[in-house]
Image (cartoon, rainbow, N blue to C red):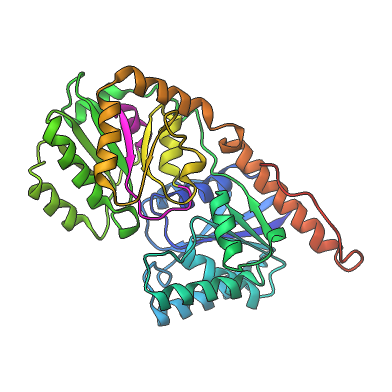
Amino acid sequence: MPGTNILYVITKLELGGAQKQALSLMRHLNKEEYKIFLFTAFNGLLMDEALAISGITVKRSRFIERPISPLKDLLALFEIYGFIKEKQIDIVHTHSSKAGIIGRLAARLAGVKIIIHTVHGWSFNDYQPFWTRLLYIWLERWIGGFTDRLIVVSRYDQEKGLSNNIAGKDRYSVIRYGIDYAEFSGKQDAGKARQELGLNADDVVVGMVACFKPQKSPGDFVRLAGLINQSLPGVKFVLVGDGALRENIEDLISQYNLPNNMFLLGWREDIPEILSAIDVFALTSLWEGLPISVLEAFASHKPVVATDTGGVREVVFENKTGFLVPPGDIKAMAEKVRILLNDKSLRLKMGDNAHSGLGISYRLDYMVNNTKDLYENLFTRETSLTNTPEVQFSAPRE
């Protein structure tokens, strides 16, 4: 496929699984085979990282943004359409819900040969008002009707899409998040991160990495800290992230009298070092696709206590790599975290199990190769449709 023009569309380059996966693909695809373009919001935490990738062209838009804005959304649609025409794009690969709708529609209108979308958790969930959820399901069905392939990062998202009649099963491919184990080896300088936070060598630390938005329910992490602090007052808590709920988080920290136990670090680019400094990773999400933060914690030899949402149970195995609790059940989560805090040998054993248990399908090179295989298979099918309309091809390896 020499000279194939591929456009990635993602709403905003913030710190998340969708962004990390897209940037990994752009960084590792062969630039002699693909001419790579990225369309995204003008600003983002990972913008400098994107601009530093050799051989890609970044289009920064002032129209595409996460909140719904009919005028800006329409302008973003026209902007993507014009960019596709100008650069003669062959493949459009969208990531994130907003970009997935606008980007795929623009690609359809522009007559792009191959349209692909990666589902990092669907745009609809059980916490939305009924009519809002129904609208998003309808949009996903409509746009899914002209999407050549839906990549899902978990089996859960595939089943959720199928149960809501979003495309047929033959148009789904499971390609897991790819983790660079060299980056998250657990051998980073934990002492440096602990020193920055003013932690002692014997301090026990619980951490979470998440955007401060309702989906991640970061307030529950503060409530978790409050419960644990009642019986284990020496435990420290690290919360990495930022967002719309920050003021609420700060109020809760004061309410639970945790200013000396809770560290709000904001967005950080040294996640491997932060993870190396904690002892237990927690995740309080209300809904998920498959959170990349859990995979990164596993790669860093950390046990995980998480809410049983989305594809989390596909990697967190009870009593082996961590514990699962119902969403919103902070009391149950506190009980599981206490078990690990009180038993160093257990949390070390679970951390090692987590590191070794992910398997090859969660490795970076495997993700890149599977995605490349998918591009080639779809491109081969597209170029041979006139002669073999029923051509079959093998799905990417999982």
Q: Which of 27/194 is in front?
A: 194
Q: Is residue 278 above or below residue 210?
A: above
Query: Which residue extends farthest bottom?
Result: 71
Query: Residue sitting at 43 percent across and 70 percent down?
Result: 64
350 up-or-down from 386: above or below: above
Q: Is residue 77 left or right of residue 170?
A: left
Residue extent of the magenta highlight: 270-290
User: Which residue is rendered at x = 25% and y = 23% of the image?
Assistant: 342
Write down the quadrant of residue 106 in the picture.
bottom right
Q: Could you tell whether 104 is left or right of 329 in the image? A: right
Count of labels shown?
Answer: 0
Let me know if residue 266 is in the magenta part. no
Residue 23 x/y as whole percent: 51, 48
| Residue sitting nearer the eye, 262 or 71 | 262
Residue 76 in picture, x, y percent from top left: 48, 74
Front position in the image: 12 or 390 = 390
> Residue 7 appears in which quarter of the rendering?
bottom right
Determine if residue 248 is in view. Answer: yes
Q: Is residue 288 magenta?
A: yes
Residue 31 visible in the shown view = no
Q: Residue furthest right?
A: 387
Q: Quadrant of residue 92?
A: bottom right
Image coordinates for residue 46, horizontal then vertical, percent? 40, 50
User: Image point 44% across, 22% down: which residue?
Assistant: 352
In the rendered image, the quadrant that contains the C terminus is top right
- Please give left or right for residue 171 compared with residue 358 in the image: right
As displayed, is residue 292 above or below residue 203? Answer: below
Q: Residue 223, position in %: x, y?
A: 19, 46
